[in-house]
Amino acid sequence: MEDLANNKKYSAILDASRKLFWKHGFRRVTIEEICREARTSKMTFYRFFPDKIELAKTVLDQYYTDSMVSFRKIIHENSTAAVKMQKMIEMKLEGSNDISNEFIQDFLFSKDATLSAYFAERLKDIYAEGMREFKNGQEAGWIRKDLNVEFLFNFSQKILPVITDDSMLKLFSSPQEMIREVSNLIIYGIAPKD
């Protein structure tokens, strides 16, 4: 079996796809545009991916894997809760750089049942791991013991339709600015940060 992690063409397709998906969303980007950006042929594309849906899943998997590695590193470092939370916000913002509203709409509310089901399943896995780590943080003492972790994670899921609403997005100069505001509100509330 071919080592895809070290294949330059495969990596170029993933990089180009992520760049284009983040900027224009999934639906609007064509395989031809991906190949042009990756400087590769459609034949090479189809050697690695049967279709754009499988490519999107791979891009999401790569993003989630990288994000979870960063999340675990932050969670397990020896620092205060405030420092860990600030680093998580920064990680979320870095991960969302260049994400357009089209991307958010296409992936969160995809009209493609396969992609939306896959996206929902991946989010479920991420939330489950996040909850486990936050509960471990409660046991370790860096997260409040009285915090209802399930509520926090369920609340963060319920807020997705609100933060993707056009009228809400218009209140901010970018989706990243809104992510920062929502994250700060959830983590720090409305009181000034110390």
Image (cartoon, rainbow, N blue to C red):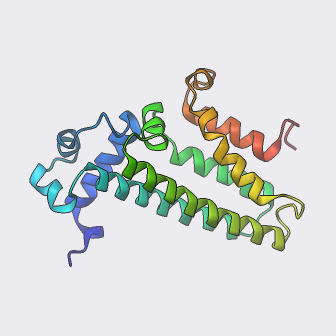
In the image, 30: left or right of 25?
left
Q: Is residue 41 visible?
A: no
The residue that appears at 36% across and 44% down in the rendered structure is 112
**Where 156 falls versus 78 (above or below)?**
above
In depth, the one of 158 and 190 nearer the eye is 158
**Where 138 falls versus 84 (above or below)?**
below
In depth, the one of 78 and 2 nearer the eye is 2
In the image, 170: left or right of 106?
right
In the image, 100: left or right of 40?
right
Given the current orientation, which residue lies at the most extreme bottom position? 1
The residue that appears at 54% across and 56% down in the rendered structure is 123
Given the current orientation, which residue lies at the most extreme front position? 113
Residue 125: quarter of image? bottom right
Please provide percent x and percent y for residue 32: 17, 41
In depth, the one of 175 and 54 nearer the eye is 54
Q: From the image, which quarter does the N terminus lie in? A: bottom left
The residue that appears at 22% across and 58% down in the rendered structure is 49
In the image, 134: left or right of 167?
right
The residue that appears at 69% across and 70% down in the rendered structure is 76
Please provide percent x and percent y for residue 121: 50, 59
Q: From the image, which quarter does the C terminus lie in? A: top right
Please provide percent x and percent y for residue 36: 17, 41
Please provide percent x and percent y for residue 61: 42, 60
Q: How many marks?
A: 0
Q: Is residue 123 visible?
A: yes
